[in-house]
Image (cartoon, rainbow, N blue to C red):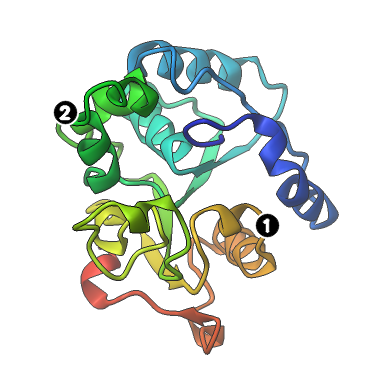
Amino acid sequence: MHGLWMHGIVFFRQRQALTRRGFAVRTFSYPSVRQDLATNTGALSHFITSLDAPRIHLVGHSLGGLLVLNALSLHRDPRLGRAVLMGAPCCGSHCAKTLARVPGVSAIVGRSMHDWVARDIPRIPDDFEVGVISGDRSLGTGRLLPGLPKPNDGIVAVEETLFAQATDSITLHVGHSEMLFSTVCVDQIVAFLHTGRFIHASVTGAARAAPDAARGR
């Protein structure tokens, strides 16, 4: 699931990499600006239901990760396995809130993001395993907006990705959009989908473990 202003085609590289790792990958595209959160969540739930597979994992980038959480809070398909959220502003978005206050610009934030920042974080089933990937390489337009907390990936602050029900979390040295092309991200996605844990032992240099406060339960 892609993020705001994007299309499923942005997952081309990641889709190839996951396919080589043995996954059958399907991409969900949705109108991230035009449609509201409820409509896009309903479309995602319908998409999941339509898949012919005995076990289904979910991977969402940015706003796509928020759709995953919202869908899980409303209905859980029994075939669902695990989910990975990449750069998803679960606890709100400084960038979205800042842009929403600018006359003539608020519309580009999109109806789904407006809906998310105006609501409480939804609760998902306690036994569902969710992994959270955040980035601390500050590359993105968010740097132009004053007040974005550090560390951040250029769009989303690490603290904005914190999700209390996360099974495991990790911070990698990547920017927000880099997550879509990073081999390190793919390695961590695969590890979590297989085991329910990220590879913290390999986190050196280009990737660092998240603080204990970011690791959920």
Up the image or down, 92 lies above or below 186; here it is: above
Please name the residue shown 72% across and 22% down the image.
Answer: 52
Task: List x then y, in percent, for residue 151.
Answer: 31, 70
Q: Is residue 41 above or below residue 213?
A: above
Viewer-proximal residue, 203 or 56?
A: 203
Vertical side of 89 occupied by 172: above or below: below
Q: Quadrant of the C terminus?
A: bottom left
Q: Secondary structure at mark 2?
A: loop
Residue 147 percent location from the top left of the image: 19, 58
Q: Is residue 30 left or right of residue 123?
A: right
Q: Is residue 116 left or right of residue 31?
A: left
Q: Is residue 166 visible?
A: no
User: Label 2 crowding class (10 Å Cα cut-off): few <14, some 14-19, many 20+?
Assistant: few
Q: Quadrant of residue 54?
A: top right
Decide which of 208, 149 is in the foreground and name it: 149
Disc nearest the viewer among 2 and 1: 1
Horizontal relation, residue 38 to residue 193: left or right: left
Residue pictured at 49% horizontal, 46% vertical? 83
Residue behind mark 2: 119
Residues under labels 2 and 1: Cα distance?
A: 31 Å
User: Callout 1: few (<14), some (14-19), or many (20+) C-alpha neighbours within 10 Å?
Assistant: some
For residue 181, the mark is 1
Q: Nearer the viewer, residue 205 or 46?
A: 205
Q: Amino acid at mark 1?
A: Phe
Task: Kindly identify the residue that appears in the image at 52 percent across and 89 percent down.
Answer: 204
